[in-house]
Amino acid sequence: MKKFSLFFKAFLGLTTAVIFISAKPLNEDPPTKNETILRTVGMMLEQGHYSPKKIDDNFSKEIFAEYLKRLDPSKRILLEKDISKLRKHETMIDDEIHGASLEFFNSSEEIYKNRITEAEEIYKQYIDKPFEFTKDESFELDPDKVGFASNESERKDRWRKYLKLQTLERYNDLQEQQEKNKEKKDFVAKSDQELEKEARAKVKKAMDRYFDRLRNQFDENQRFAMFVGAITNEMDPHTDFFPPVEKRSFDEKLSGRFFGIGALLQQDDDKIKIKSVTTGGPAWKSGEIQANDYIIKVTQANGETEELTGLTTTDAVKFIRGAEGSEVKVTVQKPDGSLKTVSMIRAELKLDETFARSVIINSGKYKIGLIDLPAFYADFQRPQAARCSQDVAKEVTRLKAEGVDGIILDIRDNGGGSLQEVVNMVGLFIKTGPVVQIRDRAGRPSQMGDNDPSVLYDGPLVVMVNERSASASEIFASAIQDYKRGIVVGSSSTFGKGTVQRAFPLGGNGTGSGAGDLGAVHLTLQKYYRVNGGATQLKGVESDIVLTGVYEAYKIREKDDKNALVWDEMPKATYQTWTNAPDLTALQQKSKERLGTNDVFTQIKDNTNILADNRKTARSLELKNYKVQLKEIKDISAKVRELTQTKDDLSVANLSSDLEGINSDSLKKDRNDFWLKYLKKDVYLNETINVMNDAIQQKGMALKN
């Protein structure tokens, strides 16, 4: 019988553990490439993951369900009898991971290929015939509310309704465009029949591309990578498998593909989904585009429009990219179902918006400094490169020179970064002590802390967070909170990612990072803990003063993922809390009294709950009712945007020493003006300023530096 082995290095804390893994396949034949990948990944998970689940029959059942869900997320391809046929493999996947021949995936391949061909024929039967939008029927948007089609008739009807909804959306859009353009010169009205035909042609084009992708690009290798990804994600959401397809490392994918508007895209069935928005890029600057939006279409400056439904991400970015300085209009579908068209100027990412920067706020009572920190950045390969702790120190020094009475540090939407920079930055505001605790798979604890007794700033400090403040941001906020050094203001809790990953290649010589001959696994190795002993994992950091965030209802945090690692504790570290700690109870009471006379955050909560629920609502396929549903969504979305903006502008201004540099570059000035405009209308900043005013007034807090 054949043997195969993997030799890789796992860096756990400060210790390097060399692990030799050997397995003996259960079948006599040499393992295929896919079998080798599966077994190797399985052993990495079992022997290297921080908290591995037992790979047994129960694990197998979870993978069985999850893979089929990923393979056919809309439940328009497979039939219930296909699932029943495959169910004999339901408890066998764990055996395949441990060396048995690969049968479940291979069996699903044969069925899936046949069903794709059938589904394409079904689609073609309906798309060439006009749809009428007068019948009172609906299409269920939430696939979790429906099972796989029980028979061919049900699958056909599901396709009919889906295509009808796609056509209805475009038909309504064309009607609205025609209404807007009717006063323009040379306007030629089209009949409803012509508009329906045009809408259906758009859907046909999108569906042709969709099935072309399924046939020619979404091949066996991609589906197998999806299968292995379901296995790694079952351990935890951040343990991932990356195949060596179209890239040699994950970082290359991040750096090259999405130049243009600054958004990381991912395939989601027949749609293009925004996975994340790059700080400082055009999408981020627009304030209208967020993660989990779908890009529906792209319009160039010359008016040419391309629908992205059915395209791959690689093809989609061909329309999103363009010459620097050129205009592009992107129409996105929000998580609540509403559509928003956003005009942007394509640009290369400007570093000045990814680095720390500050402004002065006149609260009417005090002079307050605000430092915006989009990420905990550092480049340790280049000693002269920017590091956030050094940049924040410079901003603090400049604000002190301006005579500010307090400093607000804004880390909303800050997804993390360098842990060492977090430690260095906390050290600017405390004397000495631990900042973060770390525990590895073996339970070995370690600490990172500040050993410099000097304090750069000892005045009133407020940290702004939201539900997208993650990882390193949560370490910073928790340390400030545990030391009672300042007040954390924002959403009920931050994101809740308290785990550490490292990339391990599969195949090749087993050293280095990135993808090997067979791909790479990003493996969770450690967990972060606060100095008070509690994990940042799952719970995140609970704000001292809660201001309901606009994304809270959308279930985007770590705790909303069923595979997230648990919250736990380790022994409390030894540390000394801040001598002039703010009276938190008094600050909370004053904020509560203010918000009691202004229910803006209650209204934000109520309206975003409605929008979140709307994602799971069936859409009417009758034109009149559809328009009513769409108007309700648009009205509520507009209401939320209105609620997040103050009626009167806040007094926010650049530091005088920054003005010359800002005004010397028209693009930089435009970006700066946009940032100031956003801050001046920010309802969250408004209440944070009120909290800072209260903190400054407290005895022992109004210190001049």
Image (cartoon, rainbow, N blue to C red):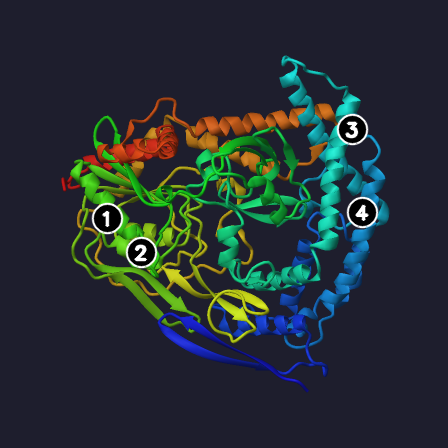
Q: Quadrant of the C terminus?
A: top left
The answer to whether mark 2 and mark 1 are in CB contact below 8 A is no
> Residue 665, how many percent across, how many down?
34, 34
Crowd rating for badge 2 (residues with CA inside 10 Å; few <14, some 14–19, many 20+): some
- Count of residue discs: 4
Query: Which quadrant holds residue 586?
Result: top left
* Amino acid found under the numbered disc labelled 3: Lys
- State the residue in front, 642 or 534: 642
- 12 relative to 317, above or below: below
**First along the sequence among labels 1 and 4:** 4
Identify residue for label 4.
120
Residue under the image location 27 percent in, 47 percent down: 392
Q: Which mark is residue 297?
A: none
Identify residue for label 1.
393
Q: CA distance from mark 2 to mark 1?
A: 12 Å
Q: CA distance from mark 1 to mark 4?
A: 60 Å
**First along the sequence among labels 3 and 2:** 3
Q: Which mark is residue 421?
A: 2
* In the image, farthest residue toward the front: 323
> Residue 560, how many percent across, how many down?
53, 50
Closer to the eye: label 3 or 1: 3
* Amino acid found under the numbered disc labelled 2: Glu
Q: CA distance from mark 4 to mark 2?
A: 53 Å
